[in-house]
Amino acid sequence: MTKDLYVIQMAVTGDLKIGRSKNVGNRLKQLQTGAPHRLKIILVAKGQGHRERKLHQALRTYRNRGQRGEWFSEEAFGSIPVDLYDMIPVEVLDDPDWWKKP
């Protein structure tokens, strides 16, 4: 089974988690357990998990506080490659600042 590429965003900070998983819903639940704020799936690109490493490299300047890993600052949102950005659901794009709301 191929893995899906995902982007998950954290409320309050807007931080983005970019990763890959066979079951993004389960991955969200796992991440939520240790997260200080609510998490929301922003993008699921079916069968595109192989792109994770290149996406991390492309967005490395947005990596949180110079850390290694899969969390990036909210500013990375606008630098997601166009073909992936086009897969973001309309309801997410209609409310891009959802994470700023209490």
Image (spheres, rainbow, N blue to C red):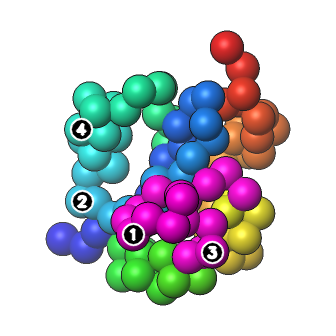
Residue that protrudes farthest toward the top in the picture? 102
> CA gap, disc 2 to disc 1?
23 Å
- The picture places residue 95, in percent across and down from the top left corner, at 77, 34
3 and 102: which is toward the camera: 102
> CA gap, disc 3 to disc 2?
27 Å
> CA gap, disc 3 to disc 1?
11 Å
- Sequence-wise, the earlier of marks 2 and 4 is 2
> CA gap, disc 2 to disc 4?
13 Å
Side of 62 where 97 appears, left or right: right
Q: Is residue 93 visible?
A: yes
In this rendering, which labeled residue sits more in front, label 4 or label 3?
3
- Sequence-wise, the earlier of marks 3 and 2 is 2
**SS at mark 3 in the image:** helix
**SS at mark 4 in the image:** helix
Residue located beneath label 2 in the image: 22
Query: Which amino acid is tagged 2?
Result: Lys
Q: Is residue 14 magenta?
A: no
- Sequence-wise, the earlier of marks 4 and 1 is 4
- Residue at the (47%, 33%) spot, across then down: 39
Residue located beneath label 1 in the image: 68
Query: Which amino acid is tagged 4?
Result: Gln
| Residue extent of the magenta highlight | 59-75
- The quarter of the picture where the N terminus appears is bottom left
Residue located beneath label 3 in the image: 61
- Sequence-wise, the earlier of marks 3 and 1 is 3
Total numbered circles: 4
